[in-house]
Image (tube, grey):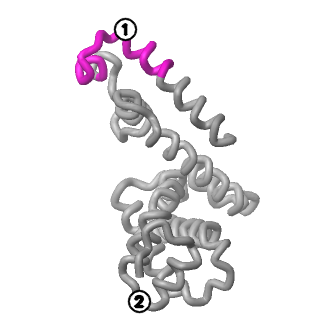
Amino acid sequence: MTTTGASDHALIAGCVNGDQQAWIQLLDRYKRQIYGVTVRFGFDVEDRHDVFQAVCLETLKSLSSLRNASSLRYWIITITVRQCSLLLKRKRQERGRELDEAALAVLDPGADTMQIYLAAEREKMLREAMEELPEPCRSLLELLFFSDERTSYLDVGGLFGWSKDSVGSARLRCLDKVRKILERKGF
């Protein structure tokens, strides 16, 4: 089965029938959303990978029971939130101490899974807008806003061959380009 650009319904059918390419494309389509939720929970890289693997196993195990292909995105986000919650509870038990306030806010019973889903949707839209950016804007914004390490304007300028003072104005121009792309997408 050729899965490139396939609908969620076709991917689900392929996965249930053991099509490895369908599984690869399904994971590729939803991995950013899964990782986006793990980031929101504040996990480190190793924990993010652990949650991703758990979500993959749960998704593969339960995919044949999904009744409506149009709810796949929401279903995967729900599985991810559940796996994140389980990991937080395990970590709490292992450490024998209270969760920090950020984790409690995420686990708050008032926190709606739909809110997490919508945040993941916004993150997906932002990532798509970032992919449309020309270089060096894409690299600049990824370095400034998406890197795990904080980088000074002096260091950023050195990487791009710019002065420290020109980094700020370049950042503003690039953010304006992202804003225009997001507006075009209806954000």
Kindly identify which residue carries mark 2.
18
Q: Which residue is depicted at the point 52% across and 27% down?
A: 177
Q: Is residue 167 magenta?
A: yes
Q: Which residue is depicted at the point 41% across and 89% down?
A: 18
Q: Is residue 162 above or below residue 138?
A: above
Q: Which residues are magenta?
A: 156-173
Query: In the displayed structure, does residue 163 sit left or right of residue 118?
Result: left
Q: CA distance from mark 2 to mark 1?
A: 55 Å
Q: Foreground: 142 or 37?
A: 142
Q: Residues within 10 Å of mark 1 (few under 14, many from 20)?
A: few
Q: Is residue 104 magenta?
A: no
Query: In the displayed structure, does residue 101 sit left or right of residue 68?
Result: left
- Image quadrant of residue 25? bottom left
Earlier residue among tags 2 and 1: 2
Quadrant of the image containing the C terminus: top right
Query: In the displayed structure, does residue 146 sit left or right of residue 100?
Result: left
- Image quadrant of residue 157? top left
Quadrant of the image containing the N terminus: bottom left
Instruction: Tell me where residue 159 appears, x and y as whole percent.
Output: 24, 24
Q: Which residue is depicted at the point 37% across and 39% down?
A: 147
Look at the numbered disc 2 and give the secondary structure of its residue: loop
Q: What count of labels does the image hold?
A: 2
Kindly identify which residue carries mark 1.
165
